[in-house]
Image (cartoon, helix red, strand yellow):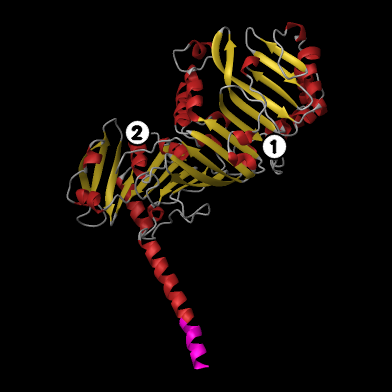
């Protein structure tokens, strides 16, 4: 009996010892969470939190599209610091208030780099970007505050805190960061829910004020800000997968107000086993399980003001009633970019919208659109092979509309650019599972398409893109970071993504 009792309690003791030792060893490398140094923004202020808990690209992988978050700061100095943060444990907080951005950062670059600052010198990698001088003592005697001036303008402040480098827009904010670390001030939580063991993490919220938060650096349209809406919050995680690839996952809340399919349109996953039509060459394709623009808040508010306005609008443009248009739009929708098109004789990228599974509704819609409403069926210069009704008009713009008993397509595209119907599983095996949304991107091909719209091109002037030059440049940067990418949302509130062909950043802290 004693022997059995001894074995029983000995096994329990050994289990506790192993678990405790493992937890200590696994947690030793992380030390204090860096986000504990970041003061929590006030309620109603949009912010972005980025944390790297290990080197996500040291093994030959890359951050892929998530690396674009490091271009969000409005100052080059902070962009460079966030690029450094991709290579070492770090945490950065960006807040987007009425008066512009505010920045905070924490880096754990290693003992050698920290010692340089304690000795009153800038490390070589920092000296390439900043001129530094000691601007006074910190809260603790002997711990100087550094003023760093970037070579392209802009200044920030740095202070050593143990093994961390604290960074902020002012010495006063450094004081607040130290107070947050010492729990005298509320800090941000870094209790990650999405893949907590992965190396990169992101939290983003618009705090119910979408007009203040840019999307991957693309300027927000402040004039369209809607007050007192449900906040949009996203959490994401990623890790590198060699060679030059990676994977990510995300979950979000409050996204339904941002999309025209509303709350119910994405609730049921679709098995995408139908054949789809794409342009050739294909640069981008996205599909969603449901589409109903009548669910949007904007449309609902207009209905109250003018109940018959939408009916008159739809009949004017399509020749069909609202109910007929609704039946046509309900169901899966696929949008793709690629192929060739022409505007006033100038070559441009083409795009195509497909409505698979529409059957008779698709035939009726295209007949009405081309014949009864616009009366251009006699002007159609080209047939669209494989479709029963419809055609294409080559001038002044290459537009097309066609349908058969399986699908309907509308687009700005030369019909000779159409591929034979194919399964999306041929694009990526990620698309085998049922989903409410999916996206496939060939980054190099999409970059080439966008560059045809660059400043100085005839199309740029023809389309009046002058006011969007900066955002167009951001889109090109985004495309360059995507490589070959496949993203899937099995549910409306979460998804995952994989990418290949993206080289990692080599900047070291």
Which residue lies most toward the bottom here? 1
Is 189 or 187 nearer to us in this picture?
Answer: 189
Residue 509 versus residue 477 in the image, above or below:
below
Asked whether residue 144 appears in the rendered view, the answer is no
Q: Is residue 272 left or right of residue 65?
A: right
Residue 380 placement: quadrant: top right
Residue depicted at x 55% and y 37%:
486
Disc 1 target residue: 273
Q: Nearer the viewer, mark 2 or mark 1?
A: 1
What is the magenta range?
1-10
> Is residue 9 within the magenta segment?
yes
Disc 2 target residue: 76
Q: Is residue 199 left or right of residue 413?
A: left
Where does residue 427 sit, x and y in percent of width and height?
Answer: 58, 33
Q: Is residue 361 left or right of residue 61?
A: right
Which mark identifies residue 117? none
> Is residue 127 within the magenta segment?
no
Say which element carries label 2: helix
Residue depicted at x 35% and y 59%:
29
Say which element carries label 1: loop
Residue depicted at x 46% and y 75%:
15
Asked whether residue 459 appears in the rendered view, the answer is yes
Where does residue 313 sit, x and y in percent of width and height?
Answer: 76, 21
């Amino acid at each position: 009996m004693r022997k059995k009792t001894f074995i029983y309690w000995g096994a329990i003791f050994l289990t506790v010892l192993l678990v405790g030792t493992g937890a200590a060893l696994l947690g030793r490398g992380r030390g204090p969470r860096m986000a504990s140094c970041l003061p929590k923004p006030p309620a109603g202020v949009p912010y972005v939190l980025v944390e790297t808990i290990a080197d996500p690209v040291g093994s030959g992988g890359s951050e892929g599209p998530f690396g674009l978050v490091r271009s969000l700061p409005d100052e080059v100095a902070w962009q460079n610091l966030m690029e450094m943060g991709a290579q070492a444990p770090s945490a950065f907080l960006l807040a987007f208030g009425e008066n512009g951005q505010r920045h905070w950062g924490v880096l754990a670059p290693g003992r050698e780099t920290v010692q340089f600052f304690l000795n009153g010198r800038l490390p070589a990698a920092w000296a390439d970007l900043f001129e530094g001088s000691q601007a006074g003592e910190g809260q603790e005697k002997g711990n100087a505050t550094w003023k760093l001036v970037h070579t392209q303008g802009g200044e920030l402040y740095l202070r050593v805190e143990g093994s961390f480098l604290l960074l902020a827009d002012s010495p006063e904010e450094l004081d607040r960061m130290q107070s947050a670390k010492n729990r005298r001030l509320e800090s941000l939580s870094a209790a990650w829910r999405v893949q907590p063991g992965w190396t990169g993490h992101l939290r983003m919220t618009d705090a119910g004020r979408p007009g203040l938060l840019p999307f991957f650096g693309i300027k927000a349209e402040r004039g369209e800000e809607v007050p007192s809406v449900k906040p949009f919050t996203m959490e994401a995680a990623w890790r590198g997968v060699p060679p030059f690839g990676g994977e990510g996952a995300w979950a979000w809340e409050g996204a339904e107000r941002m999309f025209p399919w509303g709350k119910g349109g994405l609730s049921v996953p679709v098995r995408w086993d139908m054949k789809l039509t794409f342009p050739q060459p294909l640069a981008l394709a996205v599909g969603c399980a449901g589409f109903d623009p009548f669910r949007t808040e904007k449309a609902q508010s207009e209905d109250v003001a003018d109940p018959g306005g939408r009916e008159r609008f739809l009949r004017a443009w399509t020749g069909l009633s609202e109910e007929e248009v609704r039946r046509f739009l309900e169901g899966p929708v696929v949008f793709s970019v690629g192929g060739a098109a022409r505007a006033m004789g100038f070559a441009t990228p083409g795009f195509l919208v497909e409505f698979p599974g529409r059957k008779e509704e698709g035939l009726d819609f295209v007949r009405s659109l081309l014949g009864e409403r616009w009366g251009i069926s006699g002007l159609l210069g080209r047939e669209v092979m494989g479709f029963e009704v419809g055609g294409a008009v080559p001038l002044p713009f290459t537009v097309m509309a066609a349908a058969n008993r399986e699908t309907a397509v509308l687009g700005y595209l030369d019909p000779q650019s159409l591929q034979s119907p194919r399964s999306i599983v041929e694009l990526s095996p990620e698309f085998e599972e049922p989903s409410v949304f999916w996206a496939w991107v060939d980054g190099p091909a999409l970059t080439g398409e966008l560059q045809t719209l660059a400043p100085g091109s005839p199309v740029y002037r023809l389309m009046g893109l002058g006011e969007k030059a900066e955002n167009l440049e951001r889109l090109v940067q985004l495309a360059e970071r995507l490589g070959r990418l496949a993203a899937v949302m099995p549910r409306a509130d979460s998804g995952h993504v994989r990418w290949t062909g993206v080289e990692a950043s080599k900047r070291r802290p």
